[in-house]
Image (cartoon, coloured by chain):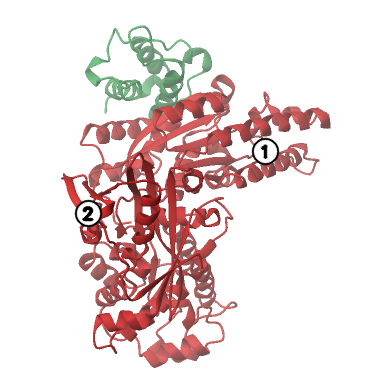
Amino acid sequence: MTTPTWPAPELRERLAAPRQTLTDLMQVLGEVEAVVPAAQTWNVGISANLTTDLAAAYFKKHAYLHGLGCRFEAGGYDVHLDNVRAFLDQGVETLVLVHFFDNVAPSFETQLASLDAATREAHLARVGAELRLVLAAAQPFKAVFLLRCHRFTPPPVGAPDPVGVTLAAFDALLVELAAAFPNVHLISGADIVAEVGRSQAFNPRFYYTFKAPYAAAFWDELARRILLATRGDGTYYFKALVLDGDNTLWGGILGEEGVEGVQLGPHDYPGNVFWVVQQALRRLRQAGVLLCLASKNDPADVDALLAGHPHQVLRDADFVAKKVGWSDKATSLRELAAELAIGLDSFVFLDDSAFECEAVRTQLPAVKVLQVPRHVFEFPALVQALETLFVPAVSGGEGSEVGEDGEKTAQYRQRARAIAARADYASHAAYLASLGIRVALRRDDRKQAARIAELTQKSNQFNLTTRRFTEGEIAAAMADADSAVYALGVRDRFGDAGLTGVIIVHYAGTVVHVVCCLLSCRVLGRGIELAAWERVFADARARGSETVAAEFVPSAKNAQAADFYERLGLTVVARDASRTTYAARLADLRAACPAHIEVVDGD
Amino acid sequence: MATEERLGRVVATILGIPREAVGADTNRDTVGTWDSLRHMNLILALEEEFGVTIPDEEAAHLTSYPLIRLVMRELLGDRA
């Protein structure tokens, strides 16, 4: 995330101040709200079986720190279903759902010891049934954050723990419910209490007087986590992590100490720190983060270390691209951006040298720069926190499946190899023809809904409207007779790029509206954006459509798609700063697929 | 900052009213935003600002700015 320009740095600093008083926070919130509004607003609502009066200040704080405006709705006390309905009317997009375990019934935890099993189970069944209804009604939200339950009373010391047993059963129920709905993400309440400490998390006075058990520190941490989990409501999303070598991936200077001399391994300090850092980095790679190496070293030394060091965790195949040599880091980053065809604002750069970090910060402000901590034992915590910058869970939240992203490194490597091969061809056209590109077109394939939603969430450069869809919305459009969802799978002789393009249309009368048109940046520059329209328009004609309508909505990143509809043969109807609308008669459109691409139905 | 000024800032900020509107007439009847939940935040903020604990029986009676001023002076004693 490049640091947002809103709000102003002085206000941002006061917002972020540690342990600020409520008055100080409210005052700075007021000052932020008094200046021009943010470009994008986060619409969030909270529904709880509690009083949540204090929550608003902290959700606003973290939204503002992410450069987002915030509209916060607090629902009524313990009426989740009513709240959900009201929120949907009010335009809330993100729902925070809190069901405080101790308030399942008055002081439930204390009561539990004396309740018989049947009564305990009846309570759980009642709450479970209610939450199931609530989550079902909450499917239209972009995201629902469900707080996993945690205890209010401390666990007994050396005595039976009836609360722990029932709480575990209740928590398992929440996890099961969440798994049934793709837009529901779990947040660990117990971990927040552990993070801020029991005495800071709860305020018994206001719990017993106003049913407001959570103190400021709890809301602060909950809001912080939710904003991170949404990646600032989708305003940032890093894809690649560029790593330095010396004193970042391993301890010491490879050029001086040699492969055997660098500090790296599970048993000795500080080699164990670098070893655990590499373990964490490998996990990021498996989750779909593109790892790159940018090291000022002799390439032969680095290759020898990657291949031969017994405790090197990351091997050559874990890096999607390497820049080893004597170029400065900014140049290496520029080259990596070109090679992988992703924007510099998708890069995180990690280096131990203050000089290199500052150089990149100054020359490439779009890159997020992180420096290895001075105390090397603090390094693993920094790397473990990195995942909050990358790869939002598409569904399921904590512990969710990674899906196709795990294959990303292999796919980007294919692309990089293809770029290297391009140099050998006389002309670009001959090169394209040599690729043997095959586009597999599928219409309304429910199995692909999750991956399609994921693509709409993440594609920026070739995305005509930058509309984000949830899996539920995609599934609904597939089921709707007046809509069609086309998915493009792309493969060539270098390999299978997977599902990389989406077109969604809506039929209304004799007009077919293009609602979404996007292509993953992995397959840009090959004419694939033109491949599917012959079929899309043929389907529309078969349904009796006579004209096609489409629009281009400019964003910070999609300038390269600005003239796409004109290239497709559509005519501009209206243009202003926020959008350009297009139309054409279907009878006039040819929309031929480029000759170097073969389009097939299905696989 | 003098006690009076700090008190005024807390009350104005938490109740969401202009600083200059806080005075002798500021009470739960004249300030629409001053409901029981806002009152909870006000007690919290006063305790935080001045490092004191306001007993429940006092908290319930802090229904106007003059009363808040009086009780805080008592709680703060010589520090005010």
User: Are there few (<14), some (14-19), or many (20+) residues within 10 Å of tag 2?
Assistant: many
Q: Are marks 1 and 2 on the same chain?
A: yes
Please, is residue A311 above or below residue A575 in the view? below
Q: What colour denotes chain B?
A: green
Residue at mark 1 to residue at mark 2: CA–CA distance: 66 Å
Does residue A265 show up? yes
The amino acid type of the residue labelled 1 equals: Pro
Label pair 1/2, CB-CB below 8 angstroms: no
Subunit that carries the residue with mark 1: A
Mark identifier at residue A16: none
Mark 2 = which residue?
A570
Q: In the image, is A567 to the left or to the right of A29?
A: left
Q: Residue at x 24, y 37 (%)?
A: A37
Mark 1 = which residue?
A154
Q: Quadrant of residue A360?
A: bottom left
Q: Which of these two is toward me, A420 or A389?
A: A420
Subunit that carries the residue with mark 2: A
Q: Quadrant of residue A292?
A: bottom left
Secondary structure, mark 2, is loop
Q: What colour denotes chain A?
A: red
Q: Earlier in the sequence, mark 1 or mark 2?
A: 1
